[in-house]
Amino acid sequence: MSSTARPPVIAAPSPAEETAVEFARNLARDVLGPGAADAEARQELPRPVMSRLGAEGLTGMTLPKSAGGAGLSHVASLAVFDALAYGDMAVAFALLCQNSAARSIWLRGTTAQHERWLPGLLSAKDIGAYAITEPTAGSDPGSMETLATRSDGGWTLDGVKTLISNVPLASTLVLSAKTNADAGTRGMSAFIVSADAAGVDGVPLRLHGSRALPVGQLTLRGVRVPGDAVLGAEGEGFKIALDAVNWARTVWAALAAGVAQASLDGAIAYVREREQFGRKIADFQAVQFQLAELATDVETARLHGYRAAALFDADDPAQIGAAAMAKLTAGEVAVRVTSKALELLGGVGYVVPSPLERYLRQARMAQLADGTGNIQRLVIARSLG
Ligand SMILES: Cc1cc2nc3c(=O)[nH]c(=O)nc-3n(C[C@H](O)[C@H](O)[C@H](O)COP(=O)(O)OP(=O)(O)OC[C@H]3O[C@@H](n4cnc5c(N)ncnc54)[C@H](O)[C@@H]3O)c2cc1C
């Protein structure tokens, strides 16, 4: 039986985990949603919000509470991301990157690396980034050119990483580099690098949407790091990166569901008030059918995410194909729902600062970061066995 023919695995947050989801819902309603337009206009990640998330352990959602995390299952963490993305998807994605850095260090790091890097990341005193993409290596990370060469018991890093979320704000960088240029993906290793190290330079890029999310280009010129900067074993960088990416693809389903739900709710509120042809436009069955389809889309993204997250919780290898399905669905649903919801507002949906136009620009990102739709199709096809 192929992995996709298994019965769906669905789980829900436990009552204890619901507290974290409730916190996220309240933060989205009271702080993230009301502040989103301003954060976008200033192109600034709201640091106080990141600190509040850190204080709740949500910078390390799946890390145990004893390590400073929130101790959530992967399934419950999706509900948290969904709730946060309802308020501001850009901040929710920045938090995902923070989580990716902390989670990788927690899963693959030594005790000394935990002690050195996790307190700053979990408190959000330090912002984290996970850097894989390069100007000539996007969908094909095995072709990356950043090199790590041995020198004086440590390593020297040279290369360029681009489109890296949380850069240049991030002070803790988890990045992939080739320690053996001739060994393809098996020659990649993961490094933990302080952005303060000499030779590290980050410059911001300007985005189409999600502008509260810092995204930048990172140049590494003769950056000297100690031997213990390697995360996991030498040569394991691709495996470590893939685990982070698979997890991020799963979370994308929740981010997409959150922003799409916000968009749908905006459209529903509008059509119930707006009158044309002497009736509320919500009374037209054509409009009701559109809303029904959009609501079904949102739940489809959500269910794909929960299924993949449940497979993560069960440490089931089917998580890889499921994560790619979640991400493919997330990208398509996010863009379709936010676009159709905007249309239901007529012309006013297109006028800045309508939140609906912001949701649509944010949603486009769901088709790009952590792999485009075609790359998800590639992974799904391979997972069919
Ligand atoms: C807002 C944002 C944030 C990001 N954050 C991060 C981050 O934090 N860390 C990080 O490392 N990266 C990050 N990225 C980079 C992202 O992962 C890449 O943009 C993505 O993987 C695609 O790579 P690329 O842009 O080089 O496109 P390319 O790989 O050049 O692809 C271009 C087009 O070709 C298609 N294509 C490529 N190969 C194939 C194939 N084999 N079959 C069919 N079609 C193919 C793609 O689908 C795409 O449409 C971010 C990107 C964005 C937009």
Image (tube, helix red, strand yellow):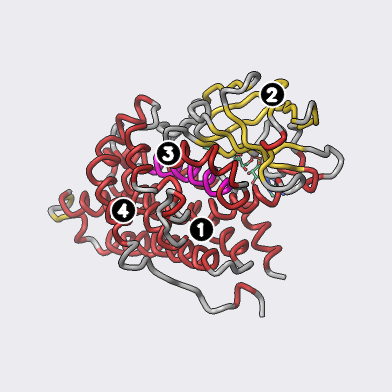
Reading the image, the residue beneath label 4 is 264
Task: Residue under label 2, please give it.
Answer: 223
Query: Could you say which quadrant of the image residue 79 lies in?
Result: bottom left
Magenta part, dominant SS: helix
Q: Marks 3 and 2, how far apart in space?
A: 36 Å
Query: Which quarter of the figure is the N terminus placed in?
Result: bottom right
Q: Residues within 10 Å of mark 3 (few under 14, many from 20)?
A: some
Q: In the drawing, does residue 280 fall left or right of residue 371?
A: left
Q: CA distance from mark 2 to mark 1?
A: 39 Å
Label 4 Cα crowd, 10 Å radius (few <14 / some 14-19 / many 20+): many
Is 259 rendered above or below residue 323? Answer: above
Q: Is mark 4 within 8 Å of ligand 1?
A: no
Whichever of labels 4 and 1 marks the residue nearer the N terminus, that label is: 4
Asked which secondary structure carries label 1, the reply is helix
**SS state under label 3:** helix
Give x and y (percent) for residue 370: 58, 46
The total of numbered circles placed on residues is 4
Query: Which x, y percent locates residue 39?
Result: 34, 30
Q: Is residue 221 above or below residue 384?
A: above
First in sequence: mark 3 or mark 4?
4
Q: Which amino acid type is shown beneath numbered disc 3?
A: Arg
**Distance from Cα at disc 4 to Cα at disc 2:** 47 Å
Residue that badge 1 annotates? 329
User: Camera-side residue: 102 or 114?
Assistant: 114
Helix, strand or loop at mark 2:
strand
Please give the label number shown on residue 361: 3
Q: Earlier in the sequence, mark 4 or mark 2?
A: 2
Magenta segment boundaries in residue numbering: 89-105
Q: Is residue 92 magenta?
A: yes
